[in-house]
Image (cartoon, rainbow, N blue to C red):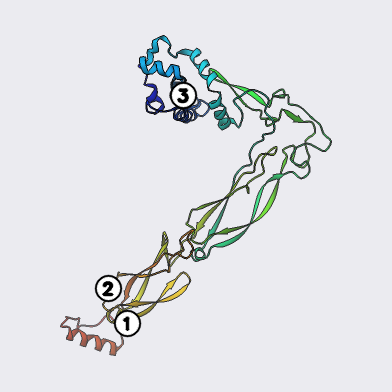
Amino acid sequence: MTKRDYYEVLSVPRTADGETIKKSYRKLALQYHPDRNPGDKVAEEKFKEAAEAYAVLSDSDKRARYDQFGHSMGGAGFSGFEGFQDAFGGFSDIFGDLFEDFFGGSGGGGRRRGRGQRGSDLEYTVELELAEVLTGKTFDLEIPRKETCGECQGTGAEKGSKKKVCEDCGGRGEVRVSQGFFTLRRTCPRCHGEGESIEKPCQACRGEGRARKTRKLQVKIPAGIEHGSRLRMTGEGEAGQSGASRGDLYIQVLVKKNKTFERQGHDIYCEVLIPYTVAVLGGEVEVPTLSGKTGLEIAGGTPAGKVLKVKGEGVPTFGMEGRRGDLYVRVQVEIPTKLSKTEREILEKLAVERKEKIQTKKSFF
């Protein structure tokens, strides 16, 4: 099978610098790594292809020969398992990062200590009425989450208990995992990279170093928030292990549907019925707003379905104090179902005046 051009494989121009080549390769390696695509032969081939391309283009001498001779490279090509061994030998900086992404571990050698697992992120959902979006709302939340154990101060061990060398990793904090034709290192799941295991686990947290507690928290939802928005509260997630950083708390904001108004961005829409006399003669009517009612001037001869704007009665613009959208009112004309004798006589005279044909038989009123 004909090999693809190495620059094409990495999706970089022939003038690309080393950093661009490295960045592109890392993206492909993360995408097609066998650990992320178990059993996927196509992904495995793409991973090998990207590794081969990077092995050549990241080396200035090999790249120069490749640019001149192509895949033959004057006999200095990249082939077989030996080529992969050379490639992995020169990829330590990249694969160190890859291993971090896959396992939270390290690609380099040596003993790994003092870095536990970051705390989990949490998510909480709050609901607002549409009217509450005008000013925002403060919620008092009670969030169950894992906190550093107060008994053992996060060590996971009973007071006075000693730690011993982890039997699974022999104190290295890492274990080796075979993946096809090469071996990876990953953080030891038993000691979490500490290299030591606990002789007598803390009874309060059962050796985890963390215990579940309830965190009371005030959350201010800003005015103008959109339905479906997510607010991030840094460090308000669960505590990390072995001194690692806390996770974050994400607040999912939902805005309830309103029977009167429909929201579109910063503007709101509603529909009102006006008397047919006002539609014909004009006048002022009251229309609802999110904060109450306001007057709206109706011009004479306003047809049903006409949309009128009430400036500044919409929703605040998120993050821009003092700015609000508008209220749009669709006018519908109310036709009376019953008329008094006087009203009917007036309308009949009007019809005669306008030379309009009317029903003179028995009225439906």
Task: Give the number of the mark in front: 1 or 2.
Answer: 2
Figure label count: 3
Residue 16 drawn at (x, y percent)? 40, 28
Which of the numbered marks, if any, corresponds to residue 303? 2
The residue at the point 63 percent across, 47 percent down is 235
Residue at the extreme bottom: 342
Label 1 residue SS? loop
* Location of the C terminus (image quadrant): bottom left
Q: Is residue 122 above or below residue 207?
A: below
Q: Is residue 255 above or below residue 297?
A: above
What kind of residue is marked 1? Lys
Which of the numbered marks, if any, corresponds to residue 100? none
The residue at the point 53 percent across, 20 percent down is 90
- The crowding category of the residue bearing disc 1, from other C-alpha atoms within 10 Å (few below 14, some 14 to 19, many at least 20), is few
What kind of residue is marked 2? Pro
The quarter holding residue 218 reads bottom right
Task: Give the number of the mark in front: 1 or 3.
Answer: 3
Circles 1, 3 touching at the beta carbon (< 8 Å): no
Q: Which residue is mark 3?
A: 47
Circles 2, 3 touching at the beta carbon (< 8 Å): no
45 or 73: nearer the viewer: 73
Cα–Cα span, label 2 and label 3:
67 Å
Q: Which residue is mark 1?
A: 338
* Image position of 184 (left or right of 293): right
